[in-house]
Amino acid sequence: MGIKNASGLKKIFLALVVVNLVGLAAYHLRTTKVDHINLRPGDEEYHHVEDINYDARIQELLTNAKEPNLKNHLTVDSSMFLNDTASPSAWRNKDTIFQDPRLAISLTLNHLRHQLAGNSTLELPFHWADWVDLTYLNHELEKPVHERMDCKHVKEYLECNSKVDRARIYDNDQYIKCMSNEDVSPRLLAKYGFLGHSQVPGYIYYDYSDYKTDEKYRLMQGKTFLFTNSPNPYKIMFLNDHGEDLVYNVTSKQKIIFSGLMNQYVENNRLSRGKVLLNPVKEFNALVQAEGLTIGDKTQYQNFSAVKELTPSMFHYGRGDVELQISLYKRMAGRTELDVLQRSFLNSLERSKEHDSANEITYFKMSSMRVNENNTDNGWHYDWRFFNGKLVDNQRTNIILERLMRNWFKFATKNDMTSWIMHGPLLSWYWSGQMFPYDNDIDIQMPVEELVKLGELYNQTLVVEDLNEGYGKFLIDVGTYIHNRDVSKRSNHIDARFIDVDSGIYIDITGLSTSKEATPKNYYKNINDSEDEGTIMNEDEEKEVYNDRRLHYYNFEHLSPLKMSMFSGVPTYIPNEIIRRLKFEYPRGGLVSYEHKDWYFVPKLQNWVHQDQLLSVVDPNDYLEGTDVSKNKLITLAKTISDEQLHGILAQSEPLQLEFSHSKGLYDFHKAELSYLVKYDQDKPKGPNDPLDKQGKMLDNYESGKNEEYDALVKKTVRLDKPLRMSLFEYEHLRDVPAKHN
Ligand SMILES: *[C@@H]1O[C@H](CO)[C@@H](O)[C@H](O)[C@H]1NC(C)=O
Ligand SMILES: *[C@@H]1O[C@H](CO)[C@@H](O)[C@H](O)[C@H]1NC(C)=O
Ligand SMILES: *[C@@H]1O[C@H](CO)[C@@H](O)[C@H](O)[C@H]1NC(C)=O
Ligand SMILES: *[C@@H]1O[C@H](CO)[C@@H](O)[C@H](O)[C@H]1NC(C)=O
Ligand SMILES: *[C@@H]1O[C@H](CO)[C@@H](O)[C@H](O)[C@H]1NC(C)=O
Ligand SMILES: *[C@@H]1O[C@H](CO)[C@@H](O)[C@H](O)[C@H]1NC(C)=O
Ligand SMILES: *[C@@H]1O[C@H](CO)[C@@H](O)[C@H](O)[C@H]1NC(C)=O
């Protein structure tokens, strides 16, 4: 959305209104008589037609909202992808790179299927360059080698704090983990899978460098690393919404143009070399069948009970548990050879034992960027390896977040991983049952027992979205030091991440457990708790405390029983205490503030609308105070929006039409569930008449979990719904509309 360019948007919108109204007026004249025409200030062409039924117009917009249409085939010339051709135009012999997820996915699935008939171990070659878009490197790769940027060039753009630092950087490329093209040895060339130096960019990053720099260099760093030294995932898991998921071990690191997957595809399908049509969805369905998996319905995403009881033992973890696992793994290693996942898990147990919260090495690395007058994004929400440009386009951000949520909870439900939303997402769930449109990350929590299981069974698994819904790919990355449970002194606050490898945006996963950490006195106490919650508060003090590795503390009852709900159309757990927790984290009115960062909550839409959109449909006389926009007045306008104005907003935004038409049912459910989960205590003594007073009157309804009606509502309604938005691939590559990056 062109948030920055309000006036531009306004012009486009007015043009739209005029076009709409011409059509509309013609339609209207045939049916009813136009009563009178109002002119708006500064807009002589704005014809206000009084008795149009805007509710009907809205319904019409929603009914006609353009459904996503994933075009899943790709036609390529197979001879360009063969591994044994001398043709200079074949990709194996070129310096620049080609990438399309449909190619990698189709060829991989086909390759797997044709091996099933045999009885040997399945081969699965993998290279990040085939699965993630690294074509950004082409602007360097297309230059002659001697004209490409080298490490010297990069250094100019690294932010240093001192002269000593700068001198160190200049003395030694290794200090910043950079290697210039000329320094790549023949051994490394072979290891990285290149035929010659011309296929290597002018410089590569073989590891993370924490010097802040600019977007362009962060892109180069992450992408040259994925292109060369980055380890592969251990497994690929293809999510299957209609039956069991498909999981395969990655067996070698090789690009398609060298592994011969296209040679095999042509052979397996008895095609002649030339144009081939690749269809990942067809390949996926064929593999599911070949694996003998039943094509069922979505029952695993249905029929949930309303509450899920946890047990305190799920939160217990200590040194003894770590020692026990180490000895079990060592005994196992004596009997059989450990596989890569087991070796890495044993290593994490041992590394955790050797280190404590003060001297652990930071695990997750970010695309930290220089902040200045031209850039306010410090990069602390992108995984450095997969960073693919700053989030500047709100629509793209919302797509990424929705798919992250969707695929995490699909994965978690299927694999019986208990987790729930917390912090920002819980607050945004409270408002709309959806993500805030201005968020850029997602927080979920799990008991430590589940976190350890995640590391032991799924670390370095690349989860591929059900291909019928899109080509999302998410890396499960679990930190080495998760076995240490006190508060981390050196940035290991987050235990694990579920990373969208197409954007570097992720879900932050934190485990909760007992620990040696001393609990601060008021760790979960709201200013007005004694008044709000009566005895509940006083009981807290005696109880066992679970913490994450930052500074969040909980008792068992704060979390359990979990309640089943939906978040953006996906079955999701929320913790037992919602309101009390949110009052604690957002004491200045998170539950009652209708405006945040220029977004306004519109109850009629049950969603947030940006100020620019709102301004385009309301009368300036109604919100201006002198020359300033009055937020309070806008809040009132948002709360009392008319059908006509709502129609105006929806007419501007196709994505919003689709989102609204898909989520209307979800809102009805959300309103209904809130009526069980939250109580309002009208009789509480009246404070000053401010919004916080209202927040003070909200309480958790602890009885909801025992309510049969609530249980029936959840059982009847909670299910995996359609995505609210098109897929990221579709948005970035297949739309007719020009991309909205600026
Ligand atoms: C693989 O299958 C063939 C033919 O069915 C059989 O002869 C052979 O013993 C099998 N090999 C193994 C290792 O199971
Ligand atoms: C993956 O590797 C593990 C350990 O070597 C093995 O037990 C498992 O059967 C393999 N899975 C597949 C699908 O080949
Ligand atoms: C090409 O791929 C085929 C099939 O994977 C493989 O057997 C062959 O060794 C490869 N040839 C070259 C030159 O890499
Ligand atoms: C849902 O679960 C209940 C038991 O919890 C069972 O009786 C019922 O048949 C299930 N319904 C469906 C549609 O699976
Ligand atoms: C910000 O951008 C302007 C215009 O491109 C440029 O002249 C200026 O040097 C930039 N400032 C910084 C600190 O990079
Ligand atoms: C997960 O895998 C990474 C990469 O191999 C490793 O560094 C980390 O220690 C692993 N974490 C766990 C919990 O095994
Ligand atoms: C606590 O209650 C008092 C009196 O009802 C009220 O004035 C105050 O705003 C409340 N504080 C918070 C943080 O809710």
Image (cartoon, rainbow, N blue to C red):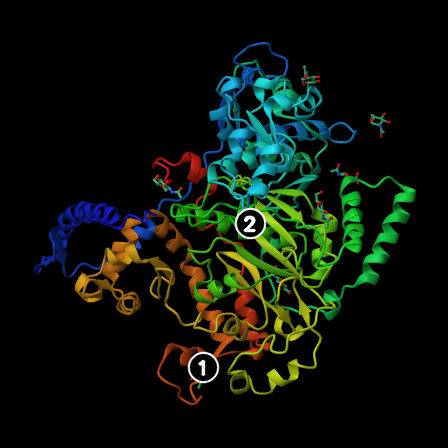
From what the image shows, is residue 567 above or below residue 386? below
Q: Say if residue 33 shows up in the picture.
A: yes
Q: Residue furthest top?
A: 86
Amino acid carrying label 2: it is Tyr
**Which label belongs to residue 34?**
none
- As measured in the structure, the alpha-carbon distance from the residue carrying label 1 to the one carrying label 2 is 35 Å
Left or right: residue 206 compared with residue 571: right
Q: Say if residue 717 shows up in the picture.
A: no
Q: What percent of the width, then of the height, locates residue 563?
A: 58, 68
From what the image shows, is residue 433 above or below residue 686? above
> Which quadrant contains ligand 7?
bottom left
208 and 87: which one is in front?
208
Query: Which residue is the site of mark 1?
Result: 697
Q: What percent of the width, then of the height, locates residue 607?
A: 38, 61
343 and 456: which one is in front?
343
Look at 55% across and 49% down and name the residue there: 506
Query: Which residue is the site of mark 2?
Result: 506
390 and 416: which one is in front?
390
Callout 1 crowding tier (Cα within 10 Å): few <14, some 14–19, many ≥20? some
N-terminal label among 1 and 2 = 2
Amino acid carrying label 1: it is Lys
373 and 454: which one is in front?
373
Look at 51% across and 59% down and name the residue there: 567
Write down the quadrant of residue 696 in the picture: bottom left
From what the image shows, is residue 83 above or below residue 605? above
Write down the quadrant of residue 495 in the picture: bottom right
